[in-house]
Image: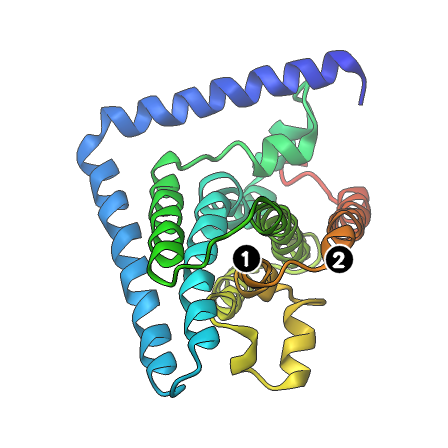
Amino acid sequence: MNQRTVRVTVLVWLKLFRQAVMRDLQFRSQAWLHLFAGIGELAVGILPVLILTSYAGSDSALQQAAVLTVGVFALTTGLMDCFVTPGLRRFDTAVRKGELDLALVRPVPTFFYAVLRWIQPTELARCVSGTAILIVAASTFDLGLGPEAVLAMIVWAVAGTVAYCAFWTDLTLLAFWVRSIEPVNDLAAAWRVAGQYPRQFFPRTVQIILVSFAPAALIGSFPAEQLLDPTAALLLAPVVVLVSCSFTALIWRYGLARYNSASS
């Protein structure tokens, strides 16, 4: 990708984001509805976590991890549902109805225009809620979080968000080979819910899956753990991003190579 393409892509993305914000401001009632729905979804999500941890006895560390995990999960899923998830859910239709053809002729990267142009700014309200949960939890539990802990959480939250978006994209790209992938999108959305629970709630085998092949834990529990106990695993975050993005890029290239225009 040359410098001119990068510049054009950034300008297009900024205009798309501005357009999305103006659209939500124009339809204010719909924007408020999305806002309250996101907060309600977060409230519903935190209830089972609090109920489960109430049976954990006097294990304060597990209770702290559970609340922090919900906060981090709200942050990461808010970003995903704002910038990535809407496009992934539309990709199946784009392939079947020929909308991908238009992306192929644009002066920006095809993947960007096909997937990342659908933006839902109201979903960012969940990020505000998640941040509030983290601040309140840190104050309530008197955690005294240091800069290294916050940095480790942020780095792993970003890496986990990228990794899970890549995982969801890998499933979505099956649209190049099968007729409809709507159930696959539902599966990816349902699986990521596991990320809002501490890893200790799951058997060892499931924990391994949650941090590797289907990295739901990387968007919730694992970054939250860094707030309580920063580890040297921070160095692995760039590796996770590189491997997940490279695998997705490989699938994208193979899928695009066999794509036949829906209009031909």
Q: Residue at x 32, y 58 (%)?
A: 42
Secondary structure, mark 1, is helix
Residue 5 is drawn in which quadrant? Answer: top right
Total marks shown come to 2
Q: How is the image coloured?
A: rainbow
Quarter placement of the N terminus: top right
Q: Position of residue 256 (x, y in %)?
A: 76, 42
Please name the residue that numbered disc 2 is placed on: 232
Quarter placement of the C terminus: top right
Label 2 packing within 10 angstroms: few (<14), some (14-19), many (20+):
few
Residue 105 is drawn in which quadrant? Answer: top right
Secondary structure, mark 2, is helix
Pointer 2 with pointer 1, Cβ within 8 A: no
From the viewer's side, name the closer residue of 245 and 223. Answer: 223
Q: Which residue is drawn at 80% across and 51% down?
A: 239
Marks 2/1: CA–CA distance: 13 Å
In this view, 138 is above or below 120: below
Q: Residue at x 50, y 52 (%)?
A: 145
Residue 150's disc is none
Amino acid carrying mark 1 in the image? Leu
From the viewer's side, name the closer residue of 67 and 41. Answer: 67
Q: Where is residue 34 in the image (x, y as percent from the top left)?
A: 27, 45
- Of the numbered discs 2 and 1, the one sitting upstream in the chain is 1
Please name the residue that numbered disc 1 is placed on: 227
Q: Is residue 242 left or right of residue 121?
A: right
